[in-house]
Image (cartoon, rainbow, N blue to C red):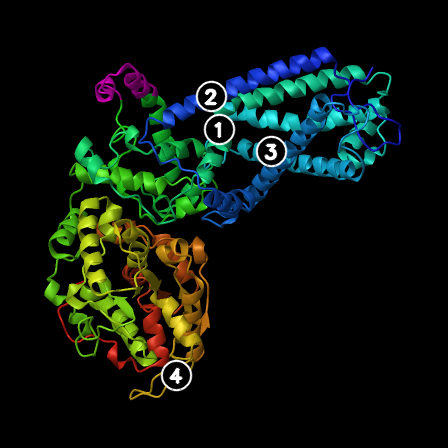
Amino acid sequence: MRETIPLLANSELSREIFGNISLASKIAFYVFSVAAMAIFCYGIYRRWRMWRIGRPGHIKFAPAAALKQFVQRALTQRALRKQNARKRTAATIAHALLFYGFIVLTIGTILVGIEHWAHDLLPGYNAREPLFHKGVYFAIFEVFMDTFGLALTAGIVWFILRRTKGNASIGHTPADWLIVGAILFLGVSGYVIEGLRIIREDTAMPGFSYVGYGFAVAFKAVGIDQSNADTPHLLLWWVHAIVALGMIAAIPYSRLMHVVAGSLSIATQQKHLGQLGAIDLEEVEETGRFGVGRVQDFTDRQLLELDACVSCGRCEDACPAFEAGKPLSPRDVVQDVKAHLNHIGPIVFAARKAGKDEDEATATEPKLHGDAISAETLWSCTTCNACYDVCPLGVSPVNLITDMRRHLIGEGELAGPPATALQKTQRQGNPWGLPTAERFNWAQGIEVPTVEDNPGFEVLYWVGCAASYDRRVQKVARAVVQLFQHAGVNFAVLGSEENCTGESARRMGDEFVFMELAEGNIATLNQHKVKTIVTHCPHCLNTLRQDYPQYGGDYEVIHHSTLIEQLIEDGKLPREPVASSTGGGAGAAGKVTYHDPCYLARVARETQAPRSLVQLSVTAGSGGAFEEAQRSGEQTSCCGAGGGRMWFDDEPDQRIGQKRIDELLATGADTVAVGCPFCLTMVSDGVNARDPKVQVKDIAELLAEALLDESALEPDPEPNHT
């Protein structure tokens, strides 16, 4: 006798819930379900316990931010769709099939459960009449479930085939085969069970479950009919149920944990791309610890991120340091820290529970620095944020790295040119170590208003250290000024009052030098009532925009390309060359390509304005053409100067970004346009070593040369401070 929602007639468009399952089997199923959930919850508790050994209070749920992150990273699969170094188009499609198939099948299972529980729990409800699992809804439901079941099966088959080929960028463990095998079994067995159900229930219009119906037709061909379908249906149903419950129980103990941890990671995402956490000085004074020297010095949220990592290798594919052969794989950093946590975490937890000193308890154990992660690995990072940007689950290897760098700085573990640059920055307010009195020398020969000359300015032009002291980059500042003056912008500069923003210092790990510089600059900016800042350096842009608010410096900060584009849109700058004493309007001759700076394109998401200006400079010339590089926009590749790498003394052919130079030259360009002083230096060095005929120029230089009188671009003869 059928116990749940028997069909009123063969023409009823519905189905039984728990059809062919006896009361004893249902009870056993629920017992097993409770056991599976208990094992699952205990596993989650074990991982939560490990997360909690980190610095607490950083796992914060913000509903609006969580919804935005869910839509961007999970629902739309934005990060997976990004084209990184190896263009994983097939993997992206396969993951989407697997993800959406899993989501729809899970929702479908929940709806079936609701239908069943409604009959058992709603008082006085007619158990012979389906609640909502009937009619048109049922037909749509069946089509959706079969279609997305095919999607899940296709996705998992692709991943199985990929694993048989031994893709090196994917982390593998023997347990992975059990997981993918179980998912494939659940997908296929679900259709087989559906086919047997169609036969034994003589389902009305079974074609809505078109895959299940196909199996039903095949079974009937081999002699299975309504009289003998009950036994294979029941046996396979139980195997299917046990495998499904086993997978639920196994989630916290396997790679599937990334589903839970990744969801929490997305829901608690707080930092923006390119943003670093501030140091708590009171905590430093209390503990005597600076940065992350032990795994428990990470925040609880960073430890949560370790479990969100599925070791897919997308971050490794996108990493310019890994591409250049440096000893850095973002994926390995995360996995190595996770392995260290799994070893040290239980010892720390037990010591805390027993009231013992955790450092004594771990004194003879492997260390985070040196044993788990090498210093050379940490210093290889350019902080370009490509790893963070392509991670579907918001894992940030770059934040792990910069926090560990802080410890190395605190321990005095940095030496050579980068350490010297930090010392110069602290003493003189710039990495070149040159006098403050020379900071305004770049403006000799042209009229540049300072905040003292023009106290009513509307826009502050932040010149930065490179344009102040590097003779080549000084031409960029002069071009910006020329464009502003022609457009009638009411601007001023700080002149000798300006100091380094501290960007390199902070990303190298010297938070104290950064704080000293930031607090001084903020005081100066506030003294002059600065509201809007424009800078040609994306690194200054990011620091002023995202780091300074942590210390009370809130300003509108824009890149020079953004403002210049607006000036052109407003008609304050011409679209055609103007007459000048030198003829004006040389334009960009030949083919031009554009190199997107990481901190402008990827971090600030500004890709349109610089392209618009480069194309305008090409149009203003004669016979020019614009050609995109292989990796462009938000998928750009780092020049190798970020994260303090500008101050490392690598041999030219060992620098990060050499493949990027190859890509730029492969366009056949006569001119490479850039929008960052670091990129200007690194790309110029790389291009000159290969093809000295190719010019490298900032966007502002190209535009000033194309539209205005470029006679003011060349600085007056001064010693070259490059």
Residue carrying label 2: 43
Label 1 close to label 2 by CB (< 8 Å)? yes
- Relative to 325, say whether 131 is above or below: above
Nearer the viewer's eye, disc 3 or disc 1?
A: 1
Which dot, 2 or 4, sits closer to the camera? 2
Q: Is residue 681 visible?
A: yes
Marks 4/3: CA distance?
58 Å
Left or right of 222: which side holds 651?
A: left
Q: Which residue is mark 3?
A: 156
Q: How far apart are the alpha carbons under marks 2 and 4?
A: 68 Å
Q: Secondary structure at mark 3?
A: helix
The dot on residue 257 is 1
Q: Which residues are magenta?
A: 346-365
Main secondary structure along the magenta-highlighted residues: helix
Q: Position of residue 136 (x, y in %)?
A: 79, 40
Residue 577: mark in rendering = 4
Q: Nearer the viewer, residue 692 or 340?
A: 340
Residue that sits furthest to the top in the current view: 24
Q: CA distance from mark 1 to mark 2?
A: 9 Å
